[in-house]
Image (cartoon, grey):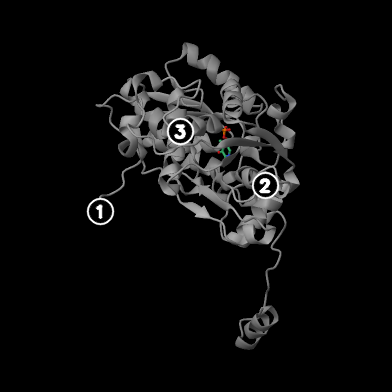
Amino acid sequence: MTRYTGLIEQYRFRLPLAAEARAISLGEGRTPLIKLENIPRQIGFDGELYVKFEGLNPTGSFKDRGMTVAVTQAVHEGARAIICASTGNTSAAAAAYAVRAGLTAFVLIPDGKIALGKLAQAIVHGAVVIQIQGNFDDGMRLVKEIGQTTPVAIVNSINPYRLQGQKTAAFEIVEALGRAPDYHCLPVGNAGNISAYWLGYCEMAGVAASYCPYHAEGRFLDAPLAKTRPRMVGYQAAGAAPFLRGAAVKHPETVATAIRIGDPQSWDLAWAAQRESNGWFDECSDAEILATQRLLAANEGVFCEPASAASLCGALRDIKAGRIAQGATVVCTLTGNGLKDPDVIMKDGLKGLIQVPAERAAVEGALLAHMA
Ligand SMILES: *Cc1c(COP(=O)(O)O)cnc(C)c1O
C-alpha cells in the first residue's frame, strides 16, 4: 500500500503541468462512488444509480480538484496571491490551498446568501474576505477586471487549470465502473464542472471534446478505458436557470446558493458538452431540491448540500418519466457536503426531538413508542 497523495500525483501525466511543478495538495480526489440501494427500489428503477460524493474532498466540495491544479500552476508561475469570486465553496478551497502554498487568498463573496460553514472555512484559513454589495455575477465581473491590472492569479473556473483538475472525477468513475456510465447528471451553476466532466469522459474514450485544448499534445491513454461516453445532463435551480432560458438571468434566486448564478462563465463549453454528448438541461424547483436532499439523507445515509441534490432530483424525475432509460447506469455528482449548510435543515426547528427526564423509564418509554 502506498499513501494516496492527491490527484496531481495520481494523474500527473494527464494534466498540463510542468514535470518540476511542486504539487500543492491536500489529498483531494478518490471520493466514493456510492451505489444507491433504497431509492432505486422504491421508484422501481432496475438500472444502477450511483452518487459520486464530492462532499468528501478535503474542504468538502469538488472545488478542491480544480484548486489543487490551479494553485499548483499559480505557484509554478510565481504568483504571490490568488483571487476568486465565490458563492462559498470556491472561497473555502482557495483559502485552504493558498495557506498550504504560502499565498494570500482574496475572496469576493456576495451580499448575504452564503452558507455559514463555507464562510467559516474562508475565515479560519485566513483568506481576505471581501463581501460585495452584489451577487456572484457581480463578483465575477469584478475579479475579471481586477485580474487585468493587479498581479493576482484568478482561480475561478475561467482558469483552465480548474477544469483540468475537475476532469479527474470522470477518470475515477470510469476506473471504478470499468466503463463510462450511460448518463451523468450534475447541478449546473457557473457550468465549469459539467464541462470538465465531459473533457474527462472524452479523454477516457480517446476522443477529443471540441474545446479540449490539450488533445493535440497526446495526453490520451494508450488504450482508452472506455468505449462509450455518457449523455451529460445538467440541472439548474428554476430561479437561476440561464441554460433553460437561453440567456443570462439578471436576478438569480434559489435556496441552493452554490448554483445561484445567472451568467455562467463556461456557457459555450457546457452547450458543447450537451450537444456533443446528446444530453440535455432541465430545471428543479427549490422545493423539489430540498425534498431530494432530505430523501437522500433519510434513505441512503448521504448528506449533501442543497445545490448537490439538484443532480439527483432531476435524475429521479427523468427516470420516472422514462427519459432516462430503465436498465441504464446513471451517475449523479453530489458536489458538496451537507454539513456546510446546516441552517437549511435546522430552520424547520428541532422537529422530531424528544425531551424526557433523565430517567430510565422515560427513555425506555420513548424507545418503545418508536420501535418498528
Ligand atoms: C460550485 C458548485 C456547483 C456548481 O458548479 P459549476 O461548475 O459552477 O457549475 C454546484 N454545487 C456545489 C456544491 C458547488 O460548490
Q: Quadrant of ligand 1?
A: top right
The residue at the far top in this view is 149
Which callout, 3 or 2, points at the residue further toward the start of the chain? Answer: 3
Give residue 83's position: percent from left, percent from top: 48, 25
> On the image, numbered disc 3 is attached to which residue?
200
Q: Nearer the viewer, mark 1 or mark 3?
A: 3
What whole-number distance in Å separates the C-alpha atoms at marks 2 and 1?
Answer: 38 Å
Give residue 322's position: percent from left, percent from top: 71, 46
Identify the amino acid type marked 1: Met
Classify residue 302 by image quadrant.
bottom right
Label 3: few (<14), some (14–19) or many (≥20) C-alpha neighbours in 10 Å: many
Say which element carries label 2. helix
Q: Is residue 300 left or right of residue 222?
A: right
Q: 239 and 322: which one is in front? A: 322
Q: Any mark on residue 1, and which? A: 1
Q: Quadrant of the C terminus?
A: bottom right
Label 1: few (<14), some (14–19) or many (≥20) C-alpha neighbours in 10 Å: few
- Residue visible at 71% across and 59% down in the picture: 349
Give residue 304's position: percent from left, percent from top: 58, 50
Which callout, 1 or 3, points at the residue further toward the start of the chain? Answer: 1
Q: 63 and 129: which one is in front? A: 63
Say which element carries label 3. helix
Decide: marks 3, 2 in contact (CB < 8 A)?
no
Which callout, 2 or 1, points at the residue further toward the start of the chain? Answer: 1
Identify the amino acid type marked 3: Gly
Q: Nearer the viewer, mark 3 or mark 2?
A: 3
Q: Any mark on residue 313, and which? A: 2
- Residue 327 higher or lower than 24, as above or below: below
Say which element carries label 1. loop
